[in-house]
Image: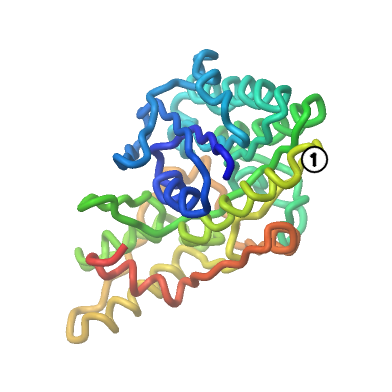
Amino acid sequence: MAVVGITGGAGYIAGLLVPALARAGHELHLLDDFSGPWKVERPEFPVERADIRDASALERLRSSDVLLHLAAVPGVMACAEDPVGSAAVNVAASDRLFRWALSGGMPVAFASSFAVVGVPRQLPITEATPPRPTHEYARQKAEGERLLEAAVQGGRASGAVLRMSNVYGRYRVGDRPIVKGNVLNEFARQAPTGALRVNAPGTQRRDYIHLEDVVDHWVSATRYLLEHRSERAFVRFNVASGESASVIELADRVAAAWSQGHPGAPPLRREIVTNPRGTIELLAPEFAVDRSLTERELGVACRHTLATEIPRLLRPDEG
């Protein structure tokens, strides 16, 4: 059993990751400043209130054997609207955390995003694809990756970047549904209204991965870091399914699943609407991922597909 420290311990991903790590036999030490859109708490897994911008918060994690850094100002719009404030968390505080942990021999896993690759020069995207960020959120995550690699080189433990693609799926804590504003989750929310609102142009393509598969990757990455902690190795993992779709294709698949589950109901309308992130969001019509290194090193494969999960998302009693 290891002690696993988690920043962002009350967030969307941590809310499902924490019980999974506990089932794997680990002891958990959770920190969160509760400023994010999710406040996932369970009585059996208490979360300490702490701001990672405060150096004293790090001392609360000193007993950890491995550190999972999920705390962040999340999202494209939040970082675009407050680049200085978001960078204070996503860059400066992360840098301090990386250097503190790795200099003390504590391995670190960092939650990054596929947004960092921007418009890649070559497809498919592999674990070695270099960052080419196109907006502030991506730039901050790319800088986080660079800072972790530098801290590993100057430290005494290993570090891992987990680049996550578009995460979908929901779960419940008690009677409370926990859901992220991903396009697929949004389509599931919109379906009962009779219309799916597709952000223009709709041809933008992404990889989609279910939250439970994301959690499997984090649990395996935790084990990997504990096994390789003293090697001072830096590695990236592609937390992606390899299953891509354009937004229009997703809308069509949601509409088809809705009609199948609601025979006799009017078909869902598809409305192309102004994209609020159109000037800063990557709108590439091509996207493909190779996760060979990730599967080989972590020994984890994705269990969920869009074909099985879209009908489930449309059933409000599930998740």
Q: Quadrant of the N terminus?
A: top right
Frontmost residue, 200 versus 220: 220
Q: Is residue 29 above or below residue 19?
A: above
Left or right of residue 300, residue 125 in this image: right
Q: Left or right of 47: which side holds 91?
A: right
Q: Position of residue 138 (x, y in %)?
A: 59, 38
Determine if residue 248 is in view. yes
* Residue at left offset 39%, top offset 74%: 252
The count of marks equals 1
- 31 over 132 or under it: above or below: above
Furthest toward the front, the residue is 1
In front here: 76 or 106?
Answer: 106
For label 1, count other residues whose C-alpha is less than 10 Å away and answer few (under 14), some (14-19) or many (20+): some
Res 94 → quadrant: top right
Q: Amino acid at mark 1?
A: Ala
Return the x and y of residue 137 as percentages of the image width and height.
55, 35
Residue 228 in picture, x, y percent from top left:
76, 44
Q: Is residue 84 visible?
A: no
The quadrant of the rendering that contains the C terminus is: bottom left
Report the residue at 39% width, 37% height from top. Answer: 10
Name the residue: 68% across, 51% down. Answer: 237
List the residue tagged with mark 1: 233
Residue 95 % position (x, y): 64, 23
Residue at position x 53%, y 55% in the image: 214
Colour convention = rainbow
Judge by depth and name the residue closer to the eye, 45 or 204. 45
| Left or right: 3, with 128 as reference point | left
Q: Residue 67 falls in which quadrant of the image?
A: top right
Residue 34 vertical placement versus 189 (above, below): above
Residue 33 figure quarter: top left
**What secondary structure is marked by label 1?**
loop
